[in-house]
Amino acid sequence: MKRIFVVVIAFLIFGFSVFAQEVELEEEPVEEEIPVEEEIPVPVIVEALEPAAPGVRFTFDEGVSFAQITRVEKLTDRSNFVRENMMIGAYFTTKTVGLPVADLQLDISAYYPLYQAFNGMQQQPRNVLNYAVDSYLAVNGTLKTFKYVLFTGSMGMHYMYQLTDEWHMHYLGLGITTGFELPISAGWTIVNRNFFSYDNANLGPNKLIQPFYASYQYHINLGVRYSRRVRNEYCYIGG
């Protein structure tokens, strides 16, 4: 009896230990991770915007100017009378940049006579307050074949008022310019402009008493330009 009892007790203890091990070894259920769909980035199409047109801009240059004015009085019984005035003064020029068809140029100059001659002989002026005011409106262009020397040219209408010892002279005609520009830095430029015009000098009171057969002028301008908006692409300093 005792043996049977011991065997039953041992069997119960063995079975309980086995059952406990199975319970311990049983894995807890693991929740499945539901894969989250990755967000696919939607491509954003950015249209390249064209740079805004800079519009019309203006440049300004100024400096000194020399002018020689020649008037020819035609005579039938002897050689023609030729009157010359050589004058020194200052000029101011404004030019457009960016006009659709062609750019424009406006020159304003003021002069004081230094020397005057009649048929090559120097004459002393009777009026020390003689002076002249000159204007020139033209279409202009720039040749940029050479990076560091820019050649310029223009053609347009010319008008000058001149006070002489005899008359209040008015000149109206056609003018042309040629010249060059030297881009010293991005903003500074040395400007040369050579002007020639052929004019009608019989618009004032002289047309009835002393008409002139021909009249022409030659000007030399030398100045500088500084611009913050219109910069030199190539220049000697800082280029």
Image (tube, rainbow, N blue to C red):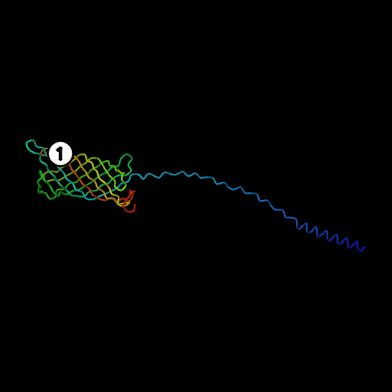
Q: Taking 7 as reference, is 184 above or below it?
A: above
Q: Residue furthest left?
A: 77
40 sits to left or right of 80 = right
Q: Nearer the viewer, residue 167 or 26?
A: 26
Q: Taking 229 as reference, is 203 above or below it?
A: above
Could you say where residue 231 lies in the image, as x and y percent from the top left? 33, 49
Could you say where residue 118 lies in the image, as x and y percent from the top left? 10, 44
The structure residue drawn at horizontal position 15% and vertical position 38%, both measured from the top left corner, is: 214
17 sits to left or right of 143 = right
Could you say where residue 175 lies in the image, as x and y percent from the top left? 22, 41
Could you say where residue 72 lies in the image, as x and y percent from the top left? 13, 40
Q: Residue furthest top?
A: 76
Q: Secondary structure at mark 1?
A: strand
| Figure quadrant of residue 27 | bottom right
Q: Which residue is mark 1?
A: 214
Q: Give the crowd class for mark 1: few <14, some 14-19, many >=20 residues within 10 Å.
A: some
Amino acid type at circle 1 is Ala
37 sits to left or right of 13 = left
